[in-house]
Image: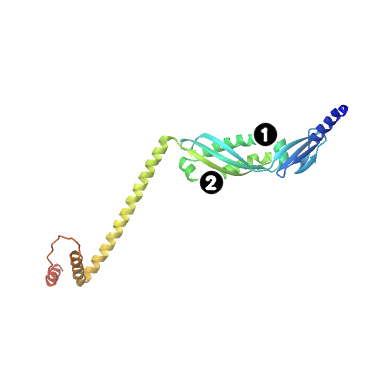
Amino acid sequence: MISFLPLLFILGFLLFNTVKILNEYERAVILRLGRFTGVRGPGMIILVPGIEKMFRVDLRTVTLDVPSQDIISRDNVTLKVNAVVYFRVEQPEKAIISVENFLHATAQISQTTLRSVIGQFELDGILAQRDIINHKLQKILDEQTEPWGVKVSAVELKAIDLPVEMQRAMAKQAEAERDKRAKVISAEGELEASVKLSEAAAVLDRNKNAIILRYLDTMREISAGQGATTTFFPLPVDFLMNVLKKDS
């Protein structure tokens, strides 16, 4: 029985290196004597021991965090920007044969592309045109990683960190803009009120009885006030009419 142990060990070793199980999201790039022969999987595959070599590739979407990069914008503002890149392997054979480590290569090209693209925009454009920047980053990265069999599906800027001095300047600018809008709204209200008063004056000027009615209504409002201590002396309507005639 002991004499069969080495044979069982050898058979187990060969079986372990011959039969491979691949998940639904995995593919195996097969090299036979160093030459590419094809992509296999998913499921069970059989390798020729000592002749065929397998490289397992995950086809699921990878979420890559691009660390904060020190970038100088087009208008010479220093800021820190980080992003997230979503990509997946579409051609496993290229991901293994065309590049040494497609994960590391994609991470490095993402960092350099982020610095290059952000540096083409001014600060206001970086803050206001994030969708345009995201699309441009995605397009450039997708073109650069296509020879590696990698498809970049999306790029999103995560955070844009500004210097403290720039944050204070932007806060003052925002406050000044709010004050400006408040003054404009107030001026527009005064203009509208003056137009309405002018129209009311024109109506009263055309109809003298309207002035008398307004006068009587004002006296009614004064007399209806609760706890009022104001004393007023109503003038006769005839007197008012005489005054109006003299004015006219």
Q: Which mark is residue 225?
A: none
Q: Quadrant of the N terminus?
A: top right
- The reply, left or right, for residue 246 in relation to residue 134 is left
Decide which of 63, 70 is in the foreground and name it.
Answer: 63
Percent x, y of residue 230: 14, 60
The residue shown at (27%, 60%) is 194
Which element is circle 1 on? loop
The residue shown at (46%, 42%) is 124
Amino acid type assigned to the residue bearing label 1 in the image: Asn
Decide which of 185, 144 is in the foreground and name it.
Answer: 185
Residue 49 visible from this viewpoint: no
Mark 2 Cα-neighbour bin, 10 Å: few <14, some 14–19, many ≥20: few
The residue tagged 1 is: 101
Q: Tell me which corner region of the image, top left, top right, bottom left or bottom right, holds residue 163.
A: top left
* Cβ atoms at labels 2 and 1 below 8 Å apart: no
The residue tagged 2 is: 132
